[in-house]
Amino acid sequence: MSKQILRCGTSIGANVKEAIRGQSKPDFYSKLGIALKEASETEYWLELLHESGYIETKHFSGIYADCQKLIRILISICKTNQ
């Protein structure tokens, strides 16, 4: 599970970085969409780690809140394209 959260968690930033250097607006929004999917997957793995007892609530709460904020930011940016 830790490898999965590391993979999807770091992929968020990589895709945002690619979006910034996107070749076009559709490319920009495509990469941000991928980042959003990776953030959602990260949220899932965090929930699973917490529910299975691998992460204590005191550590989970802050990380999870940050992940949810990031998801809201990415959703907001992607909605401006619609």
Image (cartoon, grey):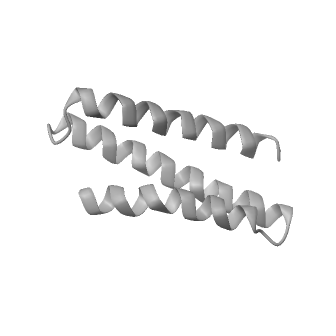
Q: Pick the quarter of the image with the N terminus.
A: bottom left
| Viewer-nearest residue: 20 or 53 | 20
Say if 47 sits above or below 40 in the image. above
Say if 15 sits above or below 77 in the image. below
Direction from residue 35 to residue 22 in the image, left or right: right
At 75% from the left edge and 68% from the top edge, which residue is drawn? Answer: 21
Q: Position of residue 45 (x, y in %)?
A: 32, 47
Direction from residue 27 to residue 15 in the image, left or right: left
Quadrant hosting residue 20: bottom right
Quadrant hosting residue 53: top left
Say if 52 sits above or below 8 in the image. above
At 23% from the left edge and 43% from the top edge, which residue is drawn? Answer: 49
Taking the view exactly as shown, the residue that stands out farthest to the left is 53
At 56% from the left edge and 40% from the top edge, which residue is drawn? Answer: 70
Quadrant hosting residue 3: bottom left
Q: How many marks?
A: 0
Taking the view exactly as shown, the residue that stands out farthest to the bottom is 23
Q: Position of residue 44 (x, y in %)?
A: 37, 44
At 35% from the left edge and 59% from the top edge, which residue is drawn? Answer: 6
Q: Position of residue 68 (x, y in %)?
A: 50, 34
| Viewer-nearest residue: 22 or 36 | 22
Q: Pick the quarter of the image with the C terminus.
A: top right
Q: Position of residue 25 (x, y in %)?
A: 85, 61
Direction from residue 46 to residue 77 in the image, left or right: right
